[in-house]
Image (cartoon, grey):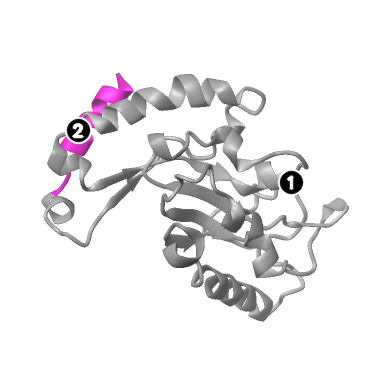
Amino acid sequence: TKIAAVKEYLKAMPSWILNDPARTLWYTEFHEPEGNFPTDPGQFINNIYPPVWTMVQSLPANIRAKIKFGPVLTRQFTENKPGRVYKTYDPGPAKSDFFGVDAYMNSWQPGDTSTAATAYTDPVAFLSQIKAYQYDASDHRPRVLPELGAIGLPSDIDGVARAGWIQGLHDELSTWTYAAQGWDMAGWIWWCAEGTGGTVGGHDIDHPSV
């Protein structure tokens, strides 16, 4: 029922999107699926994702041409535990138009999940696993970071350190090109708020203020 309803919404796409060559609708039905299927990625990959992909493929050609559909995975879920890889929850390039990751810096002090971090990570190192990820040799999907951020550290009273971190992220992401990586960096959204302490998930105090 939901898939059928979403299809009707997409078919009724507003003219200001449909008729503007510069506009694209980036659509995910699956934001951070690891949280829903933390021990059973096959349920997501094999049962939950395919029916929506099939629906998107069945849209009228003029509507389908305006939509990019894909998964948005979670950096902290994958990178906070050794042995996890992005491919586990990625349906792959044959079944998606883009690959997305919500990427937050851990908000706690390394080794102490009860205390807020006191420094921002190196931007290049922070993004390195996402930059290196490729499903296989055919994976030329554009990349999107719909949520990219870190809490405002209590020690960063004037915000200068976080501003520098954002600039460092921007500088690194600006180098991600098809020529360099085999895929385009389509865009990112800064998504952040203030925090006063550590948290095991790192995301609970990272809700957006804009």
Residue range (magenta): 1-14
Left or right of 113, for residue 178: left
Q: Within the magenta stretch, is there residue 140?
A: no
Q: Compute the Cα span from label 1 to label 2.
A: 38 Å
Q: Which residue is denoted by mark 2 in the rendering?
A: 59
Left or right of 109, for residue 12: left
Q: Give the answer, above or below, for where 180 lies relative to 11.
A: below
User: Percent position (x, y) of residue 155?
Assistant: 77, 73
Q: Give the answer, above or below, for where 128 lies relative to 81.
A: below
Q: Main secondary structure of the magenta part?
A: helix
Q: Amino acid at mark 2?
A: Leu
Residue extending farthest to the right is 111
User: Percent position (x, y) of residue 112?
Assistant: 87, 53
Image quadrant containing the N terminus: top left
Q: Secondary structure at mark 1?
A: loop
Left or right of 110, for residue 191: left
User: Percent position (x, y) of residue 190?
Assistant: 51, 63
Q: Which residue is denoted by mark 1 in the rendering?
A: 80
Q: Within the magenta stretch, is there residue 4?
A: yes
Residue 159 quadrant: bottom right
Examine the rendering and report whether any part of residue 136 can be seen.
Answer: yes
